[in-house]
Every structure is written in C-alpha cells, then in structure tokens.
Amino acid sequence: MKARQVLVPLAAVIVFLVLWEALVWVMGWPNYKMASPSDLIPAYEKYWSLFLIMGWQTLWRTIIGLLLAVIFGTGLGMVMGFSRTMRDALYPLLVGFNAVPKATVVPIVALMFVGWHDFNTVLIAFMISFFPIAVSVSIGLSTLEPEYRDILRSLGASQAQVFWKIALPKTLPEFFGALKVSVTLAFIGTNLMEIVSPHGRGLGALFDSGKTNSDYPLMFAVLIALAFLGIVLYYIVVALEKIFAGWADRTV
Amino acid sequence: MENLIEIKAVRHAYRTASGLLPVLDGLDVSVPEGGFVAVVGPSGCGKSTLTRLVAGLLIPDEGTVNVHGTRITAPRSNVGMAFQNPVLLEWRSILQNVMLPLEIVPNKLTKAEGEERARKLLALVGLEGFESKRPSELSGGMKQRASLCRALIHQPEVLILDEPFGALDAFTREDLWQTMHQVKAEEPFTGVLITHDLRESIFLADQVVVLSGRPAKTQFVMDIPDTGLRTLEDLYTPLAAERLNVLRHQIEVAQGRVAA
C-alpha cells in the first residue's frame, strides 16, 4: 500500500476534527449543545476501560449478527436466484419485512426475548442486515448468462459444479457490494438494541448512561467510537473483497 | 464413411407463454468423422437450437440425434463448445480458463500434463505469452482464440461452434479463419459450425447445410470437396464466387424472398 493511500484519508479526518473544533469555538456552543473534539479526550481518558469492554461487546455481536446475515442471506438469495417461483413468492414478503422500521421491531424483540441480552441484540443486527445480501445474491444468480451454464453443462457438469465453478464466483462482486451496506446496517442494529433495551452492555449502553448522567462529552465520545468501529469493519470487508473479488476491479 | 454425428428427422417446438413455437421441422444433418459442417440460414431459424441438440442440452420432441451411434439423451462430456460470446471466466487467468473442462470431464491427464496441453494449444492459436493474463486484458479476437482452446482441451469428439467469429471485425475474423485451419491440421476434430457468413462457411467447412426459415428443415446441402481452398485468395476465385452465388440464392429462398 502506498503512503498516499493512508495519508490522504488521515488528513481528511484531521481536517474534519479541526473544522468541528472551530465550529464549536466560533459559535460559542456549550458542551450540552455540542461537545468539541478537545472535550472528548478527557472522556476517553476517564472511561477507556469501559470503551474497550463495551466496544468489544458491540463489535462481537455485530460480527455474529453479520455472519448469520451472510449465511441466511446467501441461502435465501440462492433459493430466489435459482427458482423463479420462489423469487415471485418471497420478494413481496422480503420487501415488506425490510420496509418495517427496525426501531419499531426493537422493543418487540426486546420484550419477546427479555433477559436474552446477547441473543436479542444479535437477532436485530441480523434482521437489519440480511436483506441487501439476499437481494444481491439472487440477482447475481438469476442474471447469469445461459452460455456460462451451457459451457459447463455440455461437459456433463452437475448443478453443484455449475454453482461452485461459475455462479458463486461470478456473484462475488455483487455480494461484496451488498456486504459493505450490510456491515454498517448490522452495526446500527446492534446499537439500536443496546440503547433501547436495558442491557447495560455495549457502546449503546455507554451512550445511554452518558445521557442519564448528562455527560455530553461521553455521548459524543461514544458516537466517535462507533464511527471508528464502523470504519474498521468496513475496511475489513474491503480487504476481503480485494482478496476474493479483486479481479472485478477495472480501475487499476 | 461412418457418420459421427447423425441428426435425423428432428422436430422441436419451444413452449412459450403464447403457445407452441415450432423451431425445427424435419432437420437432417450428418457429419462424418473428421468432417466439418457449416450450418447457415436466416436469422432466428433455429441454428442455435441445433447446437444445443448436439450438445445434449436439449432433447428433441421427435427424431433422433446420434453421436457415435449412441442416441443423445443428456449432456455428455465429449463435446467442446464455443459461442459468439467467449464466456471466459473473468476471475481466472487465460491458462486456468483453458484448463476448466479438465476439472469437469473425467480424464487421465495429470495437472502438469493438462497444463502442458493448454500451453501447447494457446501457442497454436498464437496466444503464447498471454497464459497468465486475465480475460479483461485481451482483445475480442484473442478472447475468442482462448475460448477455442478451452473447447479443444479435453479432446472432444465433437466441436460445436455457434457463430464464434460473429462479433469480430472483418480482418480479425479472417485471421481466425486461418487459425482454424492450423488448428484442424494439428488437432483434428469433427465439427459443426453455425454461421451467418457464407464466405466463412465455404472457407472452413467441407459441407454447407442451408436451413429453411422457421420452423427449420434441411433445405440444401453443398459439398465443398477439399480442393485446396485454404488461403484467403481462394475466396476470390470463380469457383468460390459460383459457390457463394448458389448459397446466396438458397438463403433468399429460405427467407421466402424468391421461389425455389
């Protein structure tokens, strides 16, 4: 990786922080209106162990939810991609399901699985993030040109061989495009649950305790920590994409 | 001579939303072992259906398709196909693309032997030095050459070419015609070539079959005795012009523009 690839985004982040600091300073906003980056440092210093513990709680639940979404979304996408009937049957259900705001589902799930803190959080992360994956896999499979199939089928290949050798790799670019959307969605899902449900776990709970104690710099510090984790997860997906679907990138 | 491919009295119709759509009605084509038959006909007359029949991807409603005396009822591994769209797998190198059939078809080659054969074929079609390139780095003509190697790698009994040069510019196409002759000399095959190009048909094939308009039946058969029609100059002789004129007329009949 070239130095430029690291330095340019880093510089952009610094410019952003400086502008933020300047905005708060120029407007003369108090902490409870908007905390400035310089207020966040004491918050991190004071609560760094909580940030680590709760950040990890948020991270692993998001990742488990996302993994479930990948497995389920890919399976569902395969069913819809290979069968016209299943696609017609499932699409309206799926779109309807996705259209329901997850903020309304969170209290229901929280009640339904009261006390199952890890489970209900992972469940929301999963529910919010599988849709793009299912849609992209189904579109990738159903738009496979018949010639690709014929090339292998004329050699006597089984359906499974057609899937592993052609359909799956050909769908990977769409899959990773969807995964980039899903990874941030899963993150939103985890935090929704952590904030709404009285868990005491995860960065969402830390945000909630900041709210309860009127510790505004802490609330902003949590937001930045969430953004940071989101960026890390996103770039993990980007790295995976480079490994498995780098061939699709034509910009190099 | 025994016929390797024997298509007899084939009738077939596609089931569409608006009812049955007959595409083939009385198709007879036979290709002797080592023969190369070109099939020409008006657009949409069912030429591609014919390739799917020979590959076993489609079973006709009536009539028989035999390869080596065995009736084709399912895809068999002894077929190599190339289409107008080269359908190379973008995530594989050219070499890996050419070797794809060896991963499917049962064969006795070790991986090293398979690779050696792939390299030999690539060299034969003029793609030496491009083995590790990705398909996206190749021109249309080069992709088609690689696609041809892939169709031949497992030494298929039957090579099916469905307008493989149709999307190429005229000069590239003529280059590939000559490559086909070299390939046939080095790697003998029995082939069926679907084409729109009459010059291509008389230059490459030893028999040209003209299909009627849809539903297609065998309308006319022209033998091209091996008179040494093997350089591009041969296409501008009076004999070639005469053959082209006969075929031209048959196509017009097939299109229903003139009476037979």
Image (tube, coloured by chain):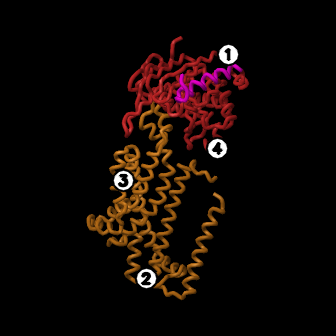
Tell me the magenta residue range.
B238-260
Kindly identify which residue carries mark 3. Answer: A91
Q: Residues within 10 Å of mark 2 (few under 14, many from 20)?
A: some
- Is disc 1 placed on a helix, strand or loop? loop
- Measure the alpha-carbon separation of dots 3 and 2: 45 Å
The reply to whether label 1 and label 4 mark residues of one chain is yes
* Mark in front: 3 vs 2: 3
- Is disc 3 placed on a helix, strand or loop? helix
* Mark in front: 1 vs 3: 1
* Mark in front: 1 vs 4: 1
Q: Residues within 10 Å of mark 3 (few under 14, many from 20)?
A: few
Is B19 placed left or right of B28 in the picture? left
Q: Position of residue A1 (x, y in %)?
A: 63, 57
- Measure the alpha-carbon separation of dots 4 and 2: 58 Å
Which color has been applied to chain B in this rendered view?
red
Q: Position of residue B219 (x, y in %)?
A: 51, 22
- Is disc 2 placed on a helix, strand or loop? loop
The tag on residue A215 is 2
Q: Is residue B109 visible?
A: no
Kindly identify which residue carries mark 4. Answer: B137
Residue B248 colored in magenta in the image: yes
The residue sitting at 66% across, 28% down in the picture is: B177
* Chain containing the residue with disc 3: A
- Measure the alpha-carbon separation of dots 3 and 4: 38 Å
**What letter labels the chain drawn in orange?**
A
Q: Main secondary structure of the magenta part?
A: helix
Q: Amino acid at mark 3?
A: Tyr
